[in-house]
Amino acid sequence: MPRSQREHQFRQSALYELHSEFFEANFAKYPVIMLDFKTSCPKSFEDTPSSICRSMLSATKKYITLLRQLVSGAYDEYEHLNVDKRAVQREKEFIASLITKFDHFRSTVDFNTSHIQTLSAIIPDLMEILYGLFGRRSVLIVDEYDAPFMSALCHVKDADEQAKIQQTYSEFLCESLKNNKHLHSGILVGVFDVRGVGLGSGLNNVDSYMAHSGFAGTRLTENPFQHAFGFTINDVWGLINDYVDNQWPHRPAITSLELGRFKRDLLVGCIQHFDGYRIGQVHHVFNPHAILSLIRELRLVKSLTDVNYSSYAFWTETGSMKVVETIKASSAQDLSRYCEYLSSSFLRQSEYRQHQGPLAEHMSLDFIDDAAVGSIGSQEQPQFPPDVDKETREELADICMVRSGDTFHDMQSLGHGLLQASTIMRLLYQAGYIVPIAKDRVGIPNSE
Protein backbone atom coordinates (compact mmCIF):
# COMPACT_ATOMS: atom_id res chain seq x y z
CA MET A 1 0.00 0.00 0.00
CA PRO A 2 1.43 3.43 -0.96
CA ARG A 3 2.58 5.68 1.88
CA SER A 4 -0.17 8.23 1.24
CA GLN A 5 -2.90 5.63 1.72
CA ARG A 6 -1.34 4.30 4.92
CA GLU A 7 -0.84 7.81 6.25
CA HIS A 8 -4.53 8.61 5.72
CA GLN A 9 -5.45 5.86 8.19
CA PHE A 10 -3.55 7.71 10.93
CA ARG A 11 -4.87 11.21 10.24
CA GLN A 12 -7.40 11.06 13.09
CA SER A 13 -5.08 9.42 15.60
CA ALA A 14 -3.66 11.14 18.68
CA LEU A 15 -0.16 10.23 17.47
CA TYR A 16 -0.65 12.29 14.31
CA GLU A 17 -2.50 15.16 15.99
CA LEU A 18 -0.19 15.58 19.00
CA HIS A 19 3.17 14.60 17.48
CA SER A 20 2.89 15.53 13.83
CA GLU A 21 6.59 16.41 13.42
CA PHE A 22 7.67 13.08 14.87
CA PHE A 23 5.10 11.30 12.70
CA GLU A 24 6.23 12.96 9.47
CA ALA A 25 9.88 12.28 10.26
CA ASN A 26 9.45 8.57 11.00
CA PHE A 27 6.27 7.19 9.45
CA ALA A 28 6.93 4.47 6.83
CA LYS A 29 10.59 5.43 6.81
CA TYR A 30 12.23 2.18 7.92
CA PRO A 31 11.78 -1.47 6.96
CA VAL A 32 10.25 -3.19 9.99
CA ILE A 33 10.85 -6.85 10.81
CA MET A 34 8.49 -8.29 13.42
CA LEU A 35 9.52 -11.39 15.39
CA ASP A 36 6.87 -13.00 17.59
CA PHE A 37 8.15 -15.56 20.07
CA LYS A 38 4.91 -16.32 21.89
CA THR A 39 3.49 -18.79 19.38
CA SER A 40 6.65 -20.89 18.98
CA CYS A 41 8.09 -21.54 22.43
CA PRO A 42 10.26 -24.66 22.87
CA LYS A 43 9.39 -27.30 25.44
CA SER A 44 12.84 -28.85 25.27
CA PHE A 45 16.28 -27.95 23.96
CA GLU A 46 15.69 -30.25 20.98
CA ASP A 47 12.64 -28.12 20.05
CA THR A 48 14.63 -24.89 20.10
CA PRO A 49 15.94 -24.80 16.48
CA SER A 50 12.49 -25.53 14.99
CA SER A 51 10.85 -22.96 17.29
CA ILE A 52 13.32 -20.28 16.24
CA CYS A 53 12.83 -21.25 12.60
CA ARG A 54 9.04 -20.83 12.77
CA SER A 55 9.43 -17.34 14.22
CA MET A 56 12.06 -16.42 11.64
CA LEU A 57 10.00 -17.68 8.67
CA SER A 58 6.94 -15.76 9.82
CA ALA A 59 8.93 -12.55 10.36
CA THR A 60 10.70 -12.56 6.98
CA LYS A 61 8.04 -14.06 4.70
CA LYS A 62 6.68 -10.78 3.30
CA TYR A 63 10.16 -9.50 2.49
CA ILE A 64 11.16 -12.76 0.78
CA THR A 65 8.01 -12.44 -1.37
CA LEU A 66 9.04 -8.88 -2.24
CA LEU A 67 12.57 -9.98 -3.16
CA ARG A 68 11.24 -12.79 -5.39
CA GLN A 69 9.20 -10.25 -7.32
CA LEU A 70 12.07 -7.79 -7.66
CA VAL A 71 14.63 -10.30 -8.95
CA SER A 72 12.03 -11.46 -11.51
CA GLY A 73 11.79 -7.87 -12.80
CA ALA A 74 8.31 -7.04 -11.46
CA TYR A 75 9.13 -3.44 -10.52
CA ASP A 76 5.85 -1.78 -11.50
CA GLU A 77 3.89 -3.19 -8.54
CA TYR A 78 6.45 -1.72 -6.12
CA GLU A 79 7.11 1.59 -7.83
CA HIS A 80 5.98 3.47 -4.70
CA LEU A 81 8.91 1.95 -2.76
CA ASN A 82 11.53 3.72 -4.90
CA VAL A 83 13.57 0.55 -5.34
CA ASP A 84 17.13 0.98 -6.60
CA LYS A 85 16.95 -1.27 -9.70
CA ARG A 86 20.70 -1.24 -10.17
CA ALA A 87 21.11 -2.46 -6.59
CA VAL A 88 18.72 -5.33 -7.31
CA GLN A 89 20.91 -6.46 -10.22
CA ARG A 90 24.09 -5.89 -8.23
CA GLU A 91 22.82 -7.95 -5.26
CA LYS A 92 21.00 -10.55 -7.34
CA GLU A 93 23.22 -13.46 -6.28
CA PHE A 94 23.06 -12.45 -2.61
CA ILE A 95 19.26 -12.18 -2.82
CA ALA A 96 18.99 -15.55 -4.56
CA SER A 97 21.14 -17.13 -1.85
CA LEU A 98 18.89 -15.74 0.89
CA ILE A 99 15.74 -16.96 -0.87
CA THR A 100 17.30 -20.44 -1.23
CA LYS A 101 18.05 -20.57 2.51
CA PHE A 102 14.50 -19.43 3.30
CA ASP A 103 13.00 -22.14 1.06
CA HIS A 104 15.31 -24.76 2.56
CA PHE A 105 14.19 -23.98 6.12
CA ARG A 106 10.56 -23.78 5.08
CA SER A 107 10.73 -27.36 3.80
CA THR A 108 12.99 -28.76 6.52
CA VAL A 109 11.37 -31.16 8.99
CA ASP A 110 14.27 -32.41 11.09
CA PHE A 111 16.06 -29.55 12.81
CA ASN A 112 19.10 -29.74 15.04
CA THR A 113 21.55 -27.34 16.64
CA SER A 114 23.74 -27.33 13.52
CA HIS A 115 21.07 -25.16 11.86
CA ILE A 116 21.27 -22.37 14.48
CA GLN A 117 24.19 -20.49 12.92
CA THR A 118 22.57 -20.34 9.47
CA LEU A 119 19.18 -19.47 10.99
CA SER A 120 20.73 -16.64 12.99
CA ALA A 121 22.26 -15.10 9.86
CA ILE A 122 19.05 -14.79 7.84
CA ILE A 123 17.64 -11.66 9.49
CA PRO A 124 20.99 -9.75 9.43
CA ASP A 125 21.42 -10.74 5.77
CA LEU A 126 17.89 -9.54 5.00
CA MET A 127 18.66 -6.20 6.69
CA GLU A 128 21.80 -5.82 4.60
CA ILE A 129 19.84 -6.46 1.39
CA LEU A 130 17.06 -4.05 2.36
CA TYR A 131 19.63 -1.37 3.12
CA GLY A 132 21.19 -1.87 -0.30
CA LEU A 133 17.82 -1.64 -2.09
CA PHE A 134 16.21 1.21 -0.14
CA GLY A 135 19.07 2.97 1.64
CA ARG A 136 17.33 2.58 5.01
CA ARG A 137 18.39 0.69 8.09
CA SER A 138 15.82 -1.70 9.55
CA VAL A 139 13.85 -1.74 12.79
CA LEU A 140 13.59 -5.13 14.51
CA ILE A 141 10.65 -5.63 16.89
CA VAL A 142 10.68 -8.76 19.05
CA ASP A 143 7.30 -9.33 20.66
CA GLU A 144 7.16 -11.47 23.82
CA TYR A 145 10.93 -11.86 23.72
CA ASP A 146 10.88 -13.46 27.19
CA ALA A 147 8.23 -16.09 26.31
CA PRO A 148 10.80 -18.81 25.43
CA PHE A 149 12.50 -18.32 28.79
CA MET A 150 9.18 -18.61 30.62
CA SER A 151 8.31 -21.69 28.57
CA ALA A 152 11.59 -23.30 29.58
CA LEU A 153 10.79 -22.67 33.24
CA CYS A 154 7.39 -24.34 32.80
CA HIS A 155 8.39 -27.37 30.77
CA VAL A 156 12.08 -28.03 31.39
CA LYS A 157 13.15 -29.34 34.78
CA ASP A 158 16.88 -29.63 34.19
CA ALA A 159 18.70 -26.37 34.97
CA ASP A 160 21.47 -27.04 32.42
CA GLU A 161 18.90 -27.58 29.67
CA GLN A 162 17.13 -24.35 30.65
CA ALA A 163 20.46 -22.53 30.40
CA LYS A 164 21.12 -23.97 26.92
CA ILE A 165 17.72 -22.79 25.67
CA GLN A 166 18.37 -19.33 27.10
CA GLN A 167 21.83 -19.18 25.56
CA THR A 168 20.57 -20.28 22.12
CA TYR A 169 17.84 -17.62 22.01
CA SER A 170 20.26 -15.01 23.31
CA GLU A 171 22.78 -15.81 20.59
CA PHE A 172 20.04 -15.74 17.93
CA LEU A 173 18.87 -12.27 19.02
CA CYS A 174 22.36 -10.88 19.53
CA GLU A 175 23.28 -11.87 15.97
CA SER A 176 20.65 -9.40 14.73
CA LEU A 177 20.89 -6.76 17.45
CA LYS A 178 24.57 -6.45 18.34
CA ASN A 179 27.10 -4.64 16.14
CA ASN A 180 24.72 -4.68 13.17
CA LYS A 181 25.40 -1.62 11.03
CA HIS A 182 22.18 -2.20 9.06
CA LEU A 183 20.00 -1.99 12.20
CA HIS A 184 18.36 1.34 13.02
CA SER A 185 16.95 0.18 16.36
CA GLY A 186 15.73 -2.93 18.13
CA ILE A 187 12.64 -3.02 20.31
CA LEU A 188 12.10 -5.96 22.65
CA VAL A 189 8.63 -6.18 24.19
CA GLY A 190 7.95 -8.49 27.11
CA VAL A 191 6.99 -8.77 30.75
CA PHE A 192 10.36 -8.96 32.43
CA ASP A 193 13.45 -6.78 32.34
CA VAL A 194 15.76 -7.72 29.46
CA ARG A 195 18.62 -8.02 31.96
CA GLY A 196 16.65 -10.57 33.95
CA VAL A 197 16.51 -13.12 31.15
CA GLY A 198 20.22 -12.97 30.41
CA LEU A 199 20.28 -10.74 27.31
CA GLY A 200 21.77 -7.63 28.87
CA SER A 201 25.35 -8.90 28.82
CA GLY A 202 25.09 -9.77 25.14
CA LEU A 203 23.76 -6.43 23.91
CA ASN A 204 25.13 -2.89 23.86
CA ASN A 205 23.35 0.37 24.67
CA VAL A 206 20.20 -1.22 26.11
CA ASP A 207 17.62 0.99 27.82
CA SER A 208 14.94 -0.81 29.82
CA TYR A 209 11.52 0.85 30.13
CA MET A 210 9.12 -0.65 32.65
CA ALA A 211 5.39 0.05 32.29
CA HIS A 212 5.09 0.92 35.99
CA SER A 213 7.94 3.37 36.22
CA GLY A 214 9.52 4.19 32.85
CA PHE A 215 13.29 4.22 33.10
CA ALA A 216 14.54 1.59 35.52
CA GLY A 217 15.36 3.14 38.88
CA THR A 218 13.41 6.39 38.43
CA ARG A 219 10.49 7.58 40.51
CA LEU A 220 6.97 6.48 39.60
CA THR A 221 6.03 9.96 38.33
CA GLU A 222 8.94 10.04 35.85
CA ASN A 223 7.53 7.83 33.14
CA PRO A 224 8.19 9.04 29.56
CA PHE A 225 5.69 6.51 28.20
CA GLN A 226 2.86 7.02 30.65
CA HIS A 227 0.43 7.98 27.86
CA ALA A 228 1.38 5.05 25.63
CA PHE A 229 -0.28 2.21 27.52
CA GLY A 230 -3.85 0.97 27.40
CA PHE A 231 -7.13 2.84 27.06
CA THR A 232 -8.01 5.91 29.11
CA ILE A 233 -11.43 6.36 30.66
CA ASN A 234 -12.26 8.76 27.80
CA ASP A 235 -11.33 6.09 25.26
CA VAL A 236 -13.64 3.59 26.99
CA TRP A 237 -16.47 6.11 27.17
CA GLY A 238 -16.08 6.88 23.46
CA LEU A 239 -16.19 3.19 22.52
CA ILE A 240 -19.30 2.62 24.64
CA ASN A 241 -21.11 5.56 23.05
CA ASP A 242 -20.11 4.62 19.52
CA TYR A 243 -21.21 1.01 19.85
CA VAL A 244 -24.46 1.56 21.74
CA ASP A 245 -25.56 4.50 19.57
CA ASN A 246 -24.51 3.13 16.19
CA GLN A 247 -24.08 -0.65 16.28
CA TRP A 248 -25.98 -2.22 19.16
CA PRO A 249 -28.79 -4.20 17.48
CA HIS A 250 -31.26 -3.76 20.38
CA ARG A 251 -31.00 0.03 20.66
CA PRO A 252 -34.36 0.80 18.99
CA ALA A 253 -36.22 -1.19 21.63
CA ILE A 254 -35.39 1.06 24.60
CA THR A 255 -36.11 4.69 25.51
CA SER A 256 -33.57 7.51 25.60
CA LEU A 257 -33.65 7.52 29.42
CA GLU A 258 -32.98 3.79 29.56
CA LEU A 259 -30.21 4.19 26.99
CA GLY A 260 -28.50 6.80 29.18
CA ARG A 261 -28.66 4.53 32.20
CA PHE A 262 -27.37 1.61 30.15
CA LYS A 263 -24.28 3.55 29.04
CA ARG A 264 -23.77 4.79 32.59
CA ASP A 265 -23.90 1.24 33.94
CA LEU A 266 -21.50 0.02 31.25
CA LEU A 267 -18.91 2.64 32.17
CA VAL A 268 -19.29 1.98 35.89
CA GLY A 269 -19.01 -1.77 35.26
CA CYS A 270 -15.85 -1.29 33.19
CA ILE A 271 -14.30 0.81 35.96
CA GLN A 272 -15.14 -1.74 38.62
CA HIS A 273 -14.01 -4.80 36.68
CA PHE A 274 -11.30 -3.69 34.23
CA ASP A 275 -9.84 -0.45 35.67
CA GLY A 276 -7.14 -0.12 38.31
CA TYR A 277 -3.93 0.16 36.31
CA ARG A 278 -1.67 3.15 36.82
CA ILE A 279 1.17 4.15 34.52
CA GLY A 280 3.23 6.96 35.97
CA GLN A 281 0.79 9.73 36.86
CA VAL A 282 -1.99 8.38 34.64
CA HIS A 283 -4.86 6.74 36.51
CA HIS A 284 -7.78 4.76 35.03
CA VAL A 285 -5.71 2.81 32.52
CA PHE A 286 -7.75 -0.05 31.02
CA ASN A 287 -6.57 -3.21 29.29
CA PRO A 288 -7.58 -2.73 25.61
CA HIS A 289 -8.13 -6.47 25.07
CA ALA A 290 -10.66 -6.65 27.91
CA ILE A 291 -12.57 -3.55 26.78
CA LEU A 292 -12.73 -4.54 23.11
CA SER A 293 -13.79 -8.06 24.06
CA LEU A 294 -16.59 -6.65 26.22
CA ILE A 295 -17.76 -4.41 23.38
CA ARG A 296 -17.94 -7.44 21.09
CA GLU A 297 -19.89 -9.39 23.73
CA LEU A 298 -22.55 -6.64 23.84
CA ARG A 299 -24.06 -7.92 20.60
CA LEU A 300 -25.41 -10.84 22.66
CA VAL A 301 -26.91 -8.54 25.30
CA LYS A 302 -30.63 -8.10 24.69
CA SER A 303 -31.63 -6.18 27.81
CA LEU A 304 -30.09 -3.73 30.27
CA THR A 305 -29.66 -6.40 32.94
CA ASP A 306 -27.92 -9.03 30.79
CA VAL A 307 -24.35 -7.74 31.25
CA ASN A 308 -22.67 -10.24 33.58
CA TYR A 309 -19.24 -8.84 34.33
CA SER A 310 -18.33 -11.63 36.73
CA SER A 311 -18.34 -14.10 33.83
CA TYR A 312 -15.89 -12.03 31.78
CA ALA A 313 -12.22 -12.94 32.28
CA PHE A 314 -10.77 -11.69 29.01
CA TRP A 315 -7.30 -10.83 30.30
CA THR A 316 -6.78 -13.89 32.48
CA GLU A 317 -7.84 -16.21 29.65
CA THR A 318 -4.97 -14.95 27.48
CA GLY A 319 -2.28 -15.90 29.99
CA SER A 320 -1.06 -18.84 31.97
CA MET A 321 -0.22 -19.34 35.62
CA LYS A 322 2.23 -22.18 34.90
CA VAL A 323 5.27 -20.08 35.79
CA VAL A 324 3.68 -18.98 39.06
CA GLU A 325 2.72 -22.58 39.82
CA THR A 326 6.38 -23.61 39.61
CA ILE A 327 7.32 -21.14 42.34
CA LYS A 328 7.77 -22.37 45.89
CA ALA A 329 8.26 -20.00 48.79
CA SER A 330 10.84 -20.28 51.53
CA SER A 331 8.93 -17.85 53.77
CA ALA A 332 5.33 -19.05 53.67
CA GLN A 333 4.29 -16.94 56.64
CA ASP A 334 5.33 -13.68 54.99
CA LEU A 335 3.78 -14.75 51.68
CA SER A 336 0.49 -15.52 53.42
CA ARG A 337 0.57 -12.12 55.14
CA TYR A 338 1.19 -10.29 51.87
CA CYS A 339 -1.60 -12.15 50.05
CA GLU A 340 -4.07 -11.63 52.86
CA TYR A 341 -3.32 -7.91 52.92
CA LEU A 342 -3.68 -7.55 49.11
CA SER A 343 -6.99 -9.44 49.07
CA SER A 344 -8.58 -7.71 52.07
CA SER A 345 -7.42 -4.23 51.02
CA PHE A 346 -8.87 -4.73 47.53
CA LEU A 347 -12.25 -5.80 48.93
CA ARG A 348 -12.33 -2.89 51.41
CA GLN A 349 -11.25 -0.44 48.73
CA SER A 350 -13.94 -1.66 46.30
CA GLU A 351 -16.62 -1.32 48.96
CA TYR A 352 -15.36 2.13 49.92
CA ARG A 353 -15.47 3.45 46.35
CA GLN A 354 -19.11 2.48 46.00
CA HIS A 355 -19.93 5.10 48.62
CA GLN A 356 -17.12 7.67 48.37
CA GLY A 357 -15.52 9.64 45.55
CA PRO A 358 -16.42 10.75 41.99
CA LEU A 359 -17.56 7.32 40.82
CA ALA A 360 -20.03 6.92 43.67
CA GLU A 361 -21.36 10.43 43.06
CA HIS A 362 -22.19 9.65 39.42
CA MET A 363 -23.62 6.18 39.94
CA SER A 364 -26.86 7.74 41.25
CA LEU A 365 -27.37 9.89 38.14
CA ASP A 366 -29.66 8.85 35.28
CA PHE A 367 -26.88 9.41 32.76
CA ILE A 368 -23.20 10.33 32.53
CA ASP A 369 -21.94 12.97 30.13
CA ASP A 370 -18.45 13.84 28.89
CA ALA A 371 -17.88 16.34 31.72
CA ALA A 372 -18.71 13.70 34.33
CA VAL A 373 -16.30 11.24 32.71
CA GLY A 374 -13.62 13.93 32.80
CA SER A 375 -14.16 14.52 36.51
CA ILE A 376 -13.86 10.80 37.25
CA GLY A 377 -10.66 10.48 35.27
CA SER A 378 -9.01 13.67 36.52
CA GLN A 379 -8.59 12.72 40.17
CA GLU A 380 -4.90 12.87 40.99
CA GLN A 381 -5.02 10.30 43.74
CA PRO A 382 -7.56 7.53 44.36
CA GLN A 383 -9.37 7.60 47.66
CA PHE A 384 -8.76 4.81 50.14
CA PRO A 385 -10.42 3.61 53.35
CA PRO A 386 -8.41 3.82 56.59
CA ASP A 387 -5.49 1.40 56.49
CA VAL A 388 -5.65 -1.50 58.94
CA ASP A 389 -2.10 -2.75 58.27
CA LYS A 390 0.14 0.20 57.50
CA GLU A 391 3.29 -1.83 58.15
CA THR A 392 2.52 -4.43 55.47
CA ARG A 393 1.41 -1.73 53.01
CA GLU A 394 4.71 0.13 53.38
CA GLU A 395 6.68 -3.13 53.22
CA LEU A 396 5.03 -4.17 49.95
CA ALA A 397 5.49 -0.70 48.43
CA ASP A 398 9.18 -0.85 49.28
CA ILE A 399 9.57 -4.37 47.85
CA CYS A 400 7.80 -3.65 44.56
CA MET A 401 8.38 0.02 43.84
CA VAL A 402 11.64 0.95 45.55
CA ARG A 403 13.53 -2.31 45.17
CA SER A 404 12.12 -3.26 41.76
CA GLY A 405 15.66 -3.28 40.35
CA ASP A 406 16.28 -6.48 42.29
CA THR A 407 14.11 -8.31 39.75
CA PHE A 408 17.26 -8.96 37.71
CA HIS A 409 18.46 -11.25 40.50
CA ASP A 410 14.94 -12.64 41.02
CA MET A 411 14.82 -13.95 37.46
CA GLN A 412 18.10 -15.78 37.95
CA SER A 413 16.54 -17.58 40.94
CA LEU A 414 13.53 -19.01 39.12
CA GLY A 415 13.62 -22.78 38.83
CA HIS A 416 16.51 -23.07 41.29
CA GLY A 417 15.03 -23.77 44.70
CA LEU A 418 12.79 -21.89 47.11
CA LEU A 419 12.15 -18.16 46.70
CA GLN A 420 11.72 -15.47 49.31
CA ALA A 421 8.22 -14.01 49.64
CA SER A 422 9.61 -10.61 48.61
CA THR A 423 10.97 -12.13 45.39
CA ILE A 424 7.57 -13.60 44.54
CA MET A 425 5.87 -10.24 45.14
CA ARG A 426 8.32 -8.46 42.83
CA LEU A 427 7.78 -11.03 40.09
CA LEU A 428 3.99 -10.61 40.38
CA TYR A 429 4.49 -6.84 40.25
CA GLN A 430 6.60 -7.15 37.08
CA ALA A 431 3.98 -9.40 35.48
CA GLY A 432 1.09 -7.01 36.23
CA TYR A 433 -0.78 -9.09 38.79
CA ILE A 434 0.14 -6.44 41.37
CA VAL A 435 0.21 -2.79 40.26
CA PRO A 436 0.98 0.64 41.72
CA ILE A 437 -2.33 2.17 42.78
CA ALA A 438 -0.86 5.26 44.47
CA LYS A 439 2.55 6.80 45.00
CA ASP A 440 2.98 4.87 48.24
CA ARG A 441 1.07 1.61 47.77
CA VAL A 442 0.54 -1.38 45.49
CA GLY A 443 -2.50 -3.58 45.12
CA ILE A 444 -4.67 -5.84 42.98
CA PRO A 445 -5.83 -3.75 39.99
CA ASN A 446 -9.42 -4.95 39.56
CA SER A 447 -11.90 -7.74 40.12
CA GLU A 448 -11.04 -9.43 36.81
Image: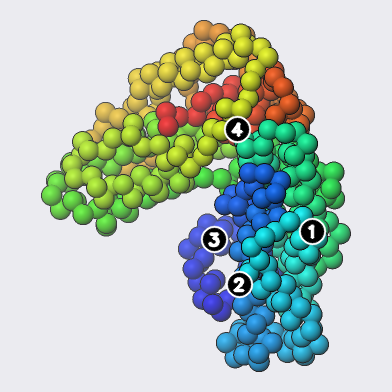
Which one is in front, 28 or 40? Answer: 40
Q: Along the polypeptide, which appears first: circle 1 or circle 4?
A: 1
At mark 4, the secondary structure is helix
In the visual, does 182 lie left or right of 378? right
User: Count the marks: how many?
Assistant: 4
* Image height of 85 relative to 373, above or below: below
Q: CA distance from mark 1 to mark 4?
A: 30 Å
Which one is in front, 262 or 404? Answer: 404
Q: CA distance from mark 2 to mark 4?
A: 34 Å
At mark 3, the secondary structure is helix
* Image height of 300 relative to 411, above or below: below
Q: Amino acid at mark 1?
A: Ser
Would you say residue 101 is visible in this rendering? yes
Query: Which-is-in-front pick, marks 2 and 4?
Result: 4
Q: Residue 158 lies in what quarter of the image?
A: top right
As drawn, the label of residue 323 is 4
Q: CA distance from mark 3 to mark 1?
A: 50 Å
Which residue occupies 70% across, 19% down? 418
Q: Along the polypeptide, which appears first: circle 3 or circle 1?
A: 3
> How far from the left and from the top, in percent, is residue 190?
64, 44
Q: Along the polypeptide, which appears first: circle 2 or circle 4?
A: 2
Query: Which-is-in-front pick, marks 3 and 2?
Result: 2
Query: Which-is-in-front pick, marks 1 and 2?
Result: 1
Point out the image quarter for the N terminus. bottom right
Q: Along the polypeptide, which appears first: circle 3 or circle 4?
A: 3
Q: Along the polypeptide, which appears first: circle 1 or circle 2?
A: 2
Query: Which-is-in-front pick, marks 3 and 1?
Result: 1
Q: Which residue is mark 2?
A: 62
